[in-house]
Structures are given as structure tokens and as C-alpha cells.
Amino acid sequence: MLKYLILTCTILIACNKPEKVKSDDIPKADHALIIDHLTRITKTNGYRNYQNLPLLNQTATYILSVFRQYADTAWLQPFTADGNTYLNVICRFGMSDKPVIVVGAHYDVCGNQEGADDNASGVTGLLELARLLKGSSPDRPIELVAYSLEEPPFFRTSCMGSYIHAKSLYDQQKDVYGMLVLEMIGFYSEEKGSQSYPLKPMKVAYGSKGDFILLTKRFGSGPFVDRFSTAFNQVAEIPVKNIKAPAEMQGIDFSDHLNYWHFGYDALMVTNTAFYRNKNYHRITDTMETLDIPRMALVIDGIYQSLLIISKEEDQTIKKRKSGKILNKTV
């Protein structure tokens, strides 16, 4: 029964195609800068996994240097895991006391690979968003966060950088309007059969080509998720599909947004569906040469425009409620 319920929901959501809004006069992501960021992050001596602290710190320093070029303020958030110090990199636009919007992406990799799509693509999205947001003074503050330790062996533990950041917001009683994570936004394919799914019937709703970006949401999401999704579907110039399903469905919580759910914050994932499409996932073949820069830029453009739209919207009551879920490892 659950499979049929999910299929019904996904068909209704996937077939909802609002009229696109033209945006010729709005700043766009720069293809040359995207390539430069990807090169600096992935073409390194070694791999930025949890065992390579010098390279992780080098990557964090690079991200911070870019954030400082554009943001109102930027800083490092150090934290300890298994006796080592790791770094989140944070910047903020807008200084109002309204509930903050968080946009995140992890910069570590799993094992020994460049991790171009997973997740240098998401981090590059943050860096370009920082450039596009420069001087924008959004009515609602926007915080960009690059996380360490999303990948195994720390995934689903309280050692994840995103858990540290979400907990810090919760502990400081900061109001959060919502959060979105950029998790693999660079790989696309026009080939039939290039897209797979956790449930085979979903192919009826979404098709067999990996040519779209997916907004991934759980049942019970709040006003931020709904409003961001509406805005993104209207402005994005790349095919967009949506799924809202139980958090327990495979793939729905496969990134840093799960930690914001843990603390009761509204959150979603922007993704190309990871291993359901990109067979280079967690392999040495996940290189920047496999990425589709023009389509990746369109995703960044859509996120930027959507952030501007929802940052100006009227405040809603923001509730902070702890889910009660217990993670299986402590810092």
C-alpha cells in the first residue's frame, strides 16, 4: 500500500509544471568561475576525506577566502570528532533579526576520489551563490555553510558538520525559516535508462532520462519548503521535478538536511538524485570532466532567484521542535 501511495503522490507532484518566469535581467552563474572553483577543489594532491586533515583545511581556507570576497561576514566553525578538529565554513548576507535561511553543502569526500559531483558541485554552488548575493541585502538573512564530515564513517552521527551547525542554531535559540542542501547538482544525461529510482513504478512519473533536478521533501514539510519549491519551479530554466515522501523512503534523507529535521527545522534537498543517476558515485571516476557545467549553472541560477523571492516574503511563525530521534554517535 505504501508503494502505491508514494507513486500516486509522486505522479501528482512530478506532473505539476507551473509556467516559467523569464529572468533575462537577473545576474547569472558564471561558467568560467564554476570551472575554476571545481578545479581548485578537486584537482589537488590527495583526496579531501576525513583522514586527510591538511587537505580538508586547505579546502576550508579556499572556501573562506571566496566567502570573504562577497559576504557581509564570514567565519570558521571548528568542531572535534574522534580527537581531530574539523571545520565548517560559514558566511552570512543580511543583518536583520528575521528567521535565517540556511543553504548548505558538504566539501568532504568518501574515500580516495575527487568527488566532483559528490560534492564539489554543491560547494561550487555555494561559492557562486555568494558572488551573486553580494550587495543584495536580503530582507531575511541568508547563511551559506560548507560542511565537513558528511561522508562515512560519520554519516548519520552527531559528528557530522551539519549536525554541529544545526545544533548551534538550536542551542542559541536562533529562529530558522528553513534550510536547503545542495547535494550533487552537476551530472545529467539525455540517455534513456540513465535514471533509476528506489521504487520501479516511479519511472512512470519521472521518466527514464536523468535530465532534471529534483527537489526532495518529506511529508509534513512547512512553509519554507513549500515556498522555495513554488519559487524554484517558476524561475528555474532546467527541468524540475519534485518528490514529497516519508523520510524513511530510501534516498529522501541522504544528505545534511536530515540534521535540521532532527532539530525541528524545515528543510529540503536539491539533487540530481546521486547514485540513482550518477554511476560515478563514490568512485575514482567522479571527476569534473563528467559534469554538465551549463545545466549546473542553471540550477544555481534557479536557487539564487528563489532565495531572493522568499527572502522578501512575509514571516510565518517558526517553531523549533526536537524530533526525539537519537543519533548513534556522539562528539
Image (cartoon, rainbow, N blue to C red):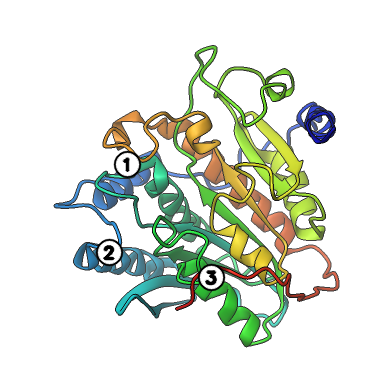
Q: Say which mark, if any, is on residue 73.
A: none
Question: From the viewer's perspective, is 160 left or right of 39?
Answer: right
Q: Identify the residue at image location x=29%, y=46%.
A: 36
Which residue in the structure is indicated by mark 1?
Answer: 35
Q: Position of residue 78 (x, y in %)?
A: 38, 80
* Residue 183 position in % (x across, y down): 51, 48
Q: Which mark is residue 163?
A: 3
- Tell me the quadrant of the picture where the C terminus can be found: bottom left
Nearer to us of marks 1 and 2 is: 2
Q: Is residue 328 left or right of residue 111?
A: right
Residue 4 in percent (x, y) is at: 83, 28
Q: Going by the picture, which residue comes out furthest to the bottom?
A: 172
Q: Which mark is residue 56?
A: 2
Disc 3 residue crowd, few under 14, some 14–19, many 20+, Cα 10 Å: many
Amino acid tagged 3: Tyr
Which secondary structure, mark 1?
helix
Between residues 7 and 78, which one lies in front from this camera angle? 7
Q: Nearer the viewer, mark 3 or mark 1?
A: 3
Q: Residue at x 78, y 53 (%)?
A: 227
Say whether disc 3 or disc 1 marks the residue closer to the N-terminus. 1
**Of residues 298 and 207, which is closer to you in this image?**
207
Of residues 156 and 114, the one nearer the viewer is 156
Where 22 sits versus 300, above or below?
above
User: CA gap, disc 3 to disc 2?
Assistant: 18 Å
User: Dot 2, crowdedness within 10 Å: few (<14), some or many (≥20)?
Assistant: many
Query: Amino acid under label 1?
Result: Ile
Judge depth for marks 3 and 2 and give the one in front.
Answer: 3
Q: Would residue 112 be found to the left or right of residue 260 on screen?
A: left
**Could you tell me which residue is drawn at 68 percent across and 86 percent down?**
173
